[in-house]
Amino acid sequence: MYYGKQDALEAAFPDADEIEAKRFFLTEEQREQIQNLAGAPLEDRLLTLHVGKKADKILGYAFLETHEVRTMPETLLIVVSPDGGIAKILLAAFYEPPEYEAPKRWLEQFDRAKLTPGLRVNRDIKGIAGSTLTAHAVTSGIRRVLAMYQILILDQATKESE
């Protein structure tokens, strides 16, 4: 099932009172930090993340992650919990042939995953037979999102508390 942006955000945060969009224009230093942590390129310097809130409590952070699989794009809505683990992955768009789409069961191996050196295909992440490029594209996208979370949310919170 593919989700439109609004439907994906509502599915990501069904209990939210508010879903706030936050925009970031990355400095070159932030962009390089994210690329280094992710081990994957980051083309855009303008990023939007969505913060799901209930009352004053943050439920999580949702990132729309678009990347090329073989020759066509895929867009995932990746939700990161306040503790920095993957909470949910929703498929928003997939333009490759359907047989290359990552199965839901395969995506479940990312549940609660955090950014570690082992979060890679053929290490902590099993590959997908016949869809190697999809497995690598999704894993790189998730690593990018977790790196964005670390730089834009965690590091910023640490700086503000000092």
Image (spheres, grey):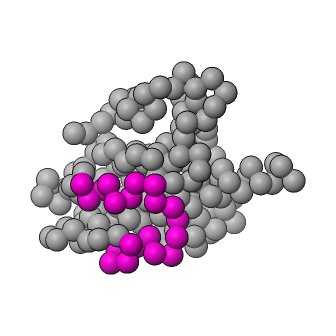
Q: What range of the chain is rendered magenta? A: 105-124
Does residue 25 show up? no
Q: List the single residue furthest toward the bottom.
A: 122
Residue drawn at 24 percent across, 54 percent down: 105
Q: Is residue 112 covered in magenta? A: yes
Horizontally, is 10 left or right of 72 in the view? right
Residue 40 drawn above or below residue 96: below
Q: In this orientation, which residue lies closer to the viewer: 82 or 48?
A: 82
Residue drawn at 61 percent across, 35 percent down: 58
Provide residue 74's location: percent of width, then percent of height: 30, 53
Provide residue 62's location: percent of width, then percent of height: 49, 42
Residue 9 drawn above or below residue 94: above
Provide residue 36's location: percent of width, then percent of height: 58, 73
Residue drawn at 29 percent across, 71 percent down: 126
Could you tell me what secondary structure mostly forms the magenta stretch?
Answer: loop
Horizontally, is 143 left or right of 27 in the view? left
Q: List the single residue furthest toward the right.
A: 162
Quarter of the view holding residue 137: bottom left
Horizontally, is 50 left or right of 93 in the view? right
On the rendered image, what quadrant is the N terminus found in?
top left
Quarter of the view holding residue 51: top right
Q: In this orientation, which residue lies closer to the viewer: 143 or 86?
A: 86
Residue drawn at 40 percent across, 54 percent down: 111
Q: Is residue 17 covered in magenta? A: no
Residue 66 drawn above or below residue 14: below
Does residue 104 show up? yes
Provide residue 160's location: percent of width, then percent of height: 82, 48
Quarter of the view holding residue 121: bottom left
Q: In this orientation, which residue lies closer to the viewer: 26 or 132?
A: 132
